[in-house]
Image (cartoon, rainbow, N blue to C red):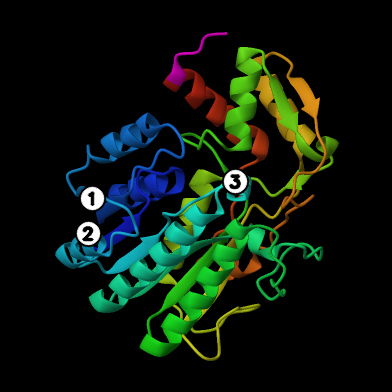
Amino acid sequence: MRRAFITGTAGFIGFHLAELLLQEGWAVAGYDGMTDYYDVRLKQDRHAMLAQHAAFSATEARLEDMEALSQAVEAFNPDVIVHLAGQAGVRYSLENPRSYIDANIVGTFNVMECARAAGVDHLLMASTSSVYGANTEMPYSEQHKADSQLTIYAATKKANEAMGHSWAHIHDLPVTMFRFFTVYGPWGRPDMALFKFTRGIIEGQPIDIYNNGDMYRDFTYVADLVRGIRGLIDAVPGGEETRVEQDSLSPAAPFRVVNIGNSDKVRLLDFVEAIETELGRDAIRNYMPMQTGDVPATWADATLLKNLTGYRPETPFREGVARFVRWYREYYGVSL
């Protein structure tokens, strides 16, 4: 039985990855701080579902608590660590930037140190498409320069990539960083656009649409995302097949960066219309200017992911929206 230590298992993506690995027969140890950034009940319910698997165990503590984290990792003795926990949210980073330093810088260093001490086969850590910042060359490729981050959230994730590379070089520890592109789906975070739009339309409240709707996103369905992560667990940098076409493998360390996205730009207004269709009612649209730190478009080149794993995200956004709306109505008991 392979053993994965996953940070953020009460979170949106960590929950889905843990569920996938448990279904495959892995033993999974979760680690989550259960912070009140959004409704803790949602996090508790995710963990309760995972706890139905005998091979799942969990520790509730903050990433900044090095003693608790190191004890949890040492007791579990994992083969791989997947680091998904941290302070998320582009817009919230404008309000509370210090929380990003604490969780994403200090917390990530603690995870890296625990991975080194445990001698894991592979450390995988979450980054974000936001690291591409002011770059306007699309689709975004891992080969592009990413030196112009627009928020402290993106800056901390770019710092994590640099920290991961140095750790891989110093300790010969295989590290993969994956850059997510606008993840959505069932059990999503309440601060994310799909969740807020759905809730607003159901409750008859206005929804804020930034840049007057002239925005495009590479929406990536969560089940596709975690399948990509699952494939990358076995694509260990520095392994037998160390290079593939368009690889981002570092020449100085067993380290690479990989985009995980749907490779398709979707107009934000088309996304809103898909939600309206599923709910059978129109949104009250509050058009607003571009918000500080935001970008007008994201679009992933997922060629490297396909070359490494044989897999590319493919769920059409209308299908993914329909699945989310069904989940939302069931979870919150909404009848229309």
Residue 68: give x, y in percent of width and height: 22, 59
Which label lies toward us, 3 or 2? 3
Label 3 to label 1, Cα distance in Å?
Answer: 29 Å
Q: Nearer the viewer, mark 3 or mark 1?
A: 3
Q: Please give the label number shown on residue 279.
A: none
Residue matched to label 3: 95
Kind of residue sitting beneath label 1: Thr
Around disc 1, counting alpha carbons within 10 Å, would you say few (fewer than 14), some (14 to 19), or many (20 or more)? some
Q: Is residue 88 in the magenta section?
A: no
On the image, the x and y values in percent for residue 42 come to 39, 32
Q: Is residue 124 above or below residue 198?
A: below
> Tag 1, which secondary structure?
strand
| Main SS class of the magenta portion in the image | loop
Who comes first in sequence, dot 2 or dot 1?
1
Q: Secondary structure at mark 2?
A: helix
Q: Residue at point 46% right, 35% down?
A: 38
Q: Quadrant of the C terminus?
A: top right
Instruction: Say whether residue 125 is left or right of residue 198.
Output: left
Q: Position of residue 316 (x, y in %)?
A: 65, 40
Q: State if disc 1 and disc 2 touch (CB < 8 Å).
A: yes
- Give 83 or 210, whichever is nearer the viewer: 210
Mark 1 lies on residue: 59
Q: CA distance from mark 2 to mark 1?
A: 8 Å
- Where is mark 2, residue-wise? 68
